[in-house]
Image (cartoon, grey):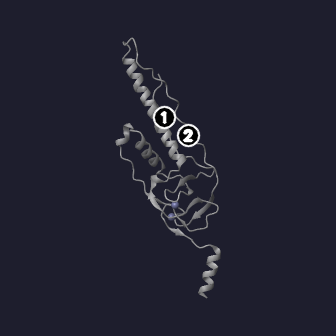
Amino acid sequence: MKEVPAIVHVELPRDAGGFVRRECPRCQRDFKTRPCRHDANILQRRLASLFPFENAHESFDEVPDWWCLYCGHRAAGDEWLTPAQQAHVEDLARSWANHVRYEQLAHVSRTLSLNPRPTFVSVPPAALPGPMSPDSDDLRTLPLVCCGEEVKALWDWEGPLFCPRCGTRHGGLSGRQQVRLEFIEE
Ligand SMILES: [Zn+2]
Ligand SMILES: [Zn+2]
């Protein structure tokens, strides 16, 4: 009899440079930051909301708010999963629930061994989904001086940038606009 896996490993995929993709819940643009020590917590909380784990009563560490790199929207740290990351977590939760249900049915059928006509046959569930494939390298790396961290932004983004960690706004004027302002001031 196959056992229900006791530990599920779930991790956000990284690109070749080690960055993790995030998606703004408001403007839905993608950016990337380095893996964060809260990522595990964010995934745990998401899994626990989908599947009642034995240790779900354990309190999770608070996850700090993040800011959108582009629109400056501020939201709780666990609202920045991309649709693909969310789908993976949901897939994992569903798959694990199937394993648990199978184990429960198998237990019932074992204890009903005296019954000459079993009323159901439990079908072994599919294996748990493997890890997500590594992320593609489609954004450009930018340093943010406020927190001394690198982020990855859309190639064609020309607006201001907000630090995802502290919300500090950087820039906001294109080169041409800056020249015009300087001209007006003279
Ligand atoms: Zn945004
Ligand atoms: Zn910052």
Looking at the image, residue 107 lies above or below residue 85: above
Gap in angstroms between the C-alphas marked 2 and 1: 13 Å
* Residue at numbered disc 2: 131
- In the structure shown, which secondary structural element does the residue marked by tag 1 occupy? helix
Residue under the image location 48 percent in, 34 percent down:
95
> x, y percentage for residue 121?
45, 20
Tag count: 2
What kind of residue is marked 1? Ser
Q: Nearer the viewer, residue 137 or 40?
A: 137
Residue under the image location 45 percent in, 23 percent down:
122
* Residue at numbered disc 1: 95
Residue under the image location 42 percent in, 20 percent down:
120
Looking at the image, residue 185 lies above or below residue 42: below
> x, y percentage for residue 130?
55, 37
Quadrant of residue 131 in the image?
top right
In the image as oriented, which residue stretches furthest toward the left? 57
Quadrant of residue 75 in the image?
bottom left
Residue under the image location 55 percent in, 46 percent down:
84
Q: Earlier in the sequence, mark 2 or mark 1?
A: 1
Mark 2 CB near ligand 1 (8 Å cut): no
Q: Is residue 113 left or right of residue 15?
A: left
